[in-house]
């Protein structure tokens, strides 16, 4: 099983920015051909896909984050990023990375908490 490791969350005021990072332990799947995604889960809500990036760099986003979030990956570093700008309170959630679609070889990581509040 590949363990996913997220970092970069924190407390930020509305309108602020954060950059999340995702890497793996056990296997360098971000460096291979997997499409990767950032997911988030707010309290009482289902986990949702926020953004995805193919191995070639093609991206797609949930409507709620289009124009504000940017997903990217560095295959050489086996790392994926999520640049989040113009953050809103409704972006508050635990953020997780994983393959998209989900793969049997991965295990959800602990996630990184993003809290947007004044």
Image: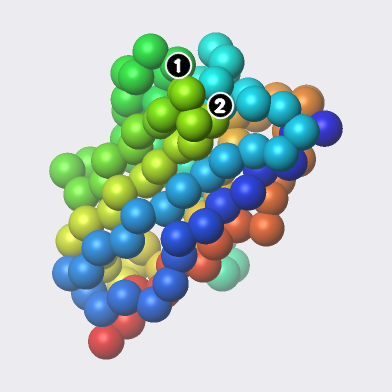
Position of 66 with respect to 38 (left or right) is left
| Classed neighbour count for the residue bearing mark 1: other residues with Cα under 10 Å, few (<14), some (14–19), many (≥20) | some
Counting from the top left corner in percent of width and height, residue 47 is at: 57, 50
Residue most extreme to the right = 1
List x then y, in percent, for residue 73.
40, 30
Query: In this view, which residue lies farthest toward the bottom?
Result: 118
Q: In the image, residue 99 lies at what x, y percent?
A: 59, 29
Evaluate whether residue 67 shows in this view: yes
Which residue is painted at 77% across and 26% down in the image? 105
Residue of label 1: 55
Residue 37: which numbered mark, if any?
none
Q: How is the image coloured?
A: rainbow
Disc 2 to disc 1, C-alpha distance: 8 Å
In the structure shown, which secondary structural element does the residue marked by tag 2 occupy? helix
Residue 93's x, y, as percent?
A: 48, 64
Residue at 70% in and 45% down? 108
Decide which of 29, 38 is in the foreground and name it.
29
What residue sits 31% from the left and 75% below the top? 12
Residue lying at 40% horizontally and 42% vertically, measured from the top left: 81
Q: How many marks?
A: 2
**Secondary element type, mark 1:** loop
Residue 18's image quarter? bottom left
In the picture, the quarter occupied by the N terminus is top right
In the displayed structure, 52 sits above or below 17; it is above
Quarter of the C terminus within the rendering: bottom left
**Residue 100 seen:** no
Q: Residues within 10 Å of mark 2 (few under 14, many from 20)?
A: many
The residue labelled by disc 2 is 30
- Quarter residue 106 falls in: top right
Judging depth in this view, the residue of 50 and 79 nearest the camera is 79
Furthest-front residue in this view: 76
């Amino acid at each position: 099983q590949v363990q996913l490791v997220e970092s970069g969350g924190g407390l930020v005021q509305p309108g602020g920015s954060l950059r999340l990072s995702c890497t793996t332990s056990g296997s360098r799947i971000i460096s291979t051909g997997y499409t990767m995604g950032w997911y988030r889960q707010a309290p009482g809500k289902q986990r949702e896909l926020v953004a995805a990036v193919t191995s070639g760099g093609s991206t797609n986003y949930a409507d709620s984050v289009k124009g504000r979030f940017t997903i990217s990956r560095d295959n050489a570093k086996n790392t994926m990023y999520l640049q989040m700008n113009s953050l809103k309170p409704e972006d508050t959630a635990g953020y997780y990375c994983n393959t998209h679609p989900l793969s049997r070889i991965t295990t959800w990581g602990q996630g990184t908490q993003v809290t947007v509040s004044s």
